[in-house]
């Protein structure tokens, strides 16, 4: 049998199917307003996320499944229009991120969509390009960037790359309900100069802590940020979680500043971690709400942000 001749592939003609992933983030290690008035956050990427599959169809309109993922449909249409692609196709999203909890479910959907559709259409899907694609749609978490970053979520713009932490685990308590992140971000957050200066110091402290791989110092920043957020979107379990962290020797507490969850930050590489994790789960189960476990993700060539087209 002779080998088939190699033929150049044409984007959105022969190359008509693409898949991609994007991670979520367990709230923020830090979120606030800087002295110049910039709203910012620090991402905390987790292994939960969204998978997207896109198949280009020259003859049909763009469709998304599930049908309520209208932001991803809007993004798909914009990307098709940008390259004058006729027709549309089918976009399927599969996510294990809870919606309305502060886990960046919408951002992960959009980033995975941009990567999958862009892979098929031959469009730029670098992190900076994805910022440009998402900026007209909504305020966005910085999950298009690998690792922990300082991100201006209202402006949809990277501020600084911080790096990655040692493996960490969060034992979280969801207090219930849903939060509309877009509506929440429409609220103007005014902070006095002294508080803005504290947020700037915390951003510097977090930057240094991540670069030194100092999880205790990261936990201190995250706990302080969670406490400051009590005046904006309080978590009724926060005081109990801080006491638990002290009792267990955990680095600190992290919360979804624009969501309904807060949890214990644990060092997954520490000796005795399985026992600490079991004790943390048992303690959190006694609080009002639903307990779950999340794990940090380490940037790699394959995740977050891998794409495949065929």
Image (tube, rainbow, N blue to C red):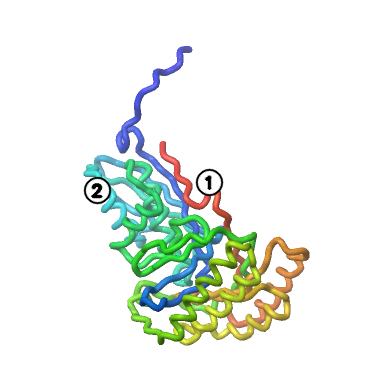
The CA span between labels 2 and 1 is 27 Å
Q: Is residue 170 left or right of residue 5?
A: right
* Numbered label attached to residue 302: 1
Residue at x-position 37% and y-position 54%: 128
Q: Quadrant of residue 219?
A: bottom right
Q: Is residue 246 above or below residue 52?
A: below
Give the x, y percent position of residue 106. 41, 63
Q: Is residue 245 left or right of residue 26?
A: right
Give the x, y percent position of residue 191. 40, 84
Residue at x-position 58% and y-position 83%: 238
Disc 1 packing (10 Å; few <14; some 14–19; many ≥20)? few
Q: What secondary structure is marked by label 1?
A: loop
Q: Is residue 134 above or below residue 235?
A: above
Q: What secondary structure is marked by label 2?
A: helix
Q: Of 176 and 34, which appears nearest the observer? A: 34
Q: Is residue 208 left or right of residue 282?
A: left
Residue at x-position 45% and y-position 86%: 194
Residue at x-position 51% and y-position 78%: 176
Q: Residue at the top extreme?
A: 1
Disc 2 packing (10 Å; few <14; some 14–19; many ≥20)? few
């Amino acid at each position: 049998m002779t080998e088939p001749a190699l033929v150049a592939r044409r984007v959105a003609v022969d190359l008509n199917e693409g898949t991609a992933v994007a991670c979520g983030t367990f709230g923020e290690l830090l979120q606030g307003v800087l002295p110049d008035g910039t709203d910012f956050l620090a991402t905390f990427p987790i292994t939960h996320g969204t998978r997207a599959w896109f198949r280009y169809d020259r003859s049909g309109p763009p469709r998304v499944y599930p049908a309520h993922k209208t932001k991803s449909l809007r993004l798909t249409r914009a990307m098709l229009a940008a390259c004058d692609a006729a027709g549309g196709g089918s976009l399927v999203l599969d996510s294990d991120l809870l919606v309305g909890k502060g886990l960046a479910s919408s951002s992960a959907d959009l980033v995975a969509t941009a990567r999958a559709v862009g892979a098929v259409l031959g469009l730029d899907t670098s992190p900076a390009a994805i910022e440009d694609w998402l900026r007209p749609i909504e305020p966005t978490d910085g999950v298009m960037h690998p690792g922990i970053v300082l991100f201006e979520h209202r402006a949809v713009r990277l501020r600084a790359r911080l790096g990655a932490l040692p493996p960490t685990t969060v034992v979280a308590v969801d207090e219930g309900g849903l939060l509309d992140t877009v509506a929440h971000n429409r609220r103007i957050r005014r902070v006095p100069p002294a508080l803005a200066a504290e947020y700037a110091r915390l951003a510097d402290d977090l930057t240094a802590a991540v670069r030194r791989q100092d999880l205790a110092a990261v936990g201190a920043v995250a706990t302080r940020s969670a406490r400051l957020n009590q005046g904006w979107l309080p978590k009724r379990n926060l005081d109990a979680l801080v006491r638990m962290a002290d009792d267990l020797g955990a680095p600190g507490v992290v919360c979804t500043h624009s969501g309904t969850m807060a949890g214990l930050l644990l060092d997954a590489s520490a000796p005795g971690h399985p026992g600490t994790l079991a004790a943390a789960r048992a303690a959190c189960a006694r609080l009002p709400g639903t307990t779950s476990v999340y794990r940090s993700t380490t940037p790699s060539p394959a995740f977050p942000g891998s794409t495949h087209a065929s």
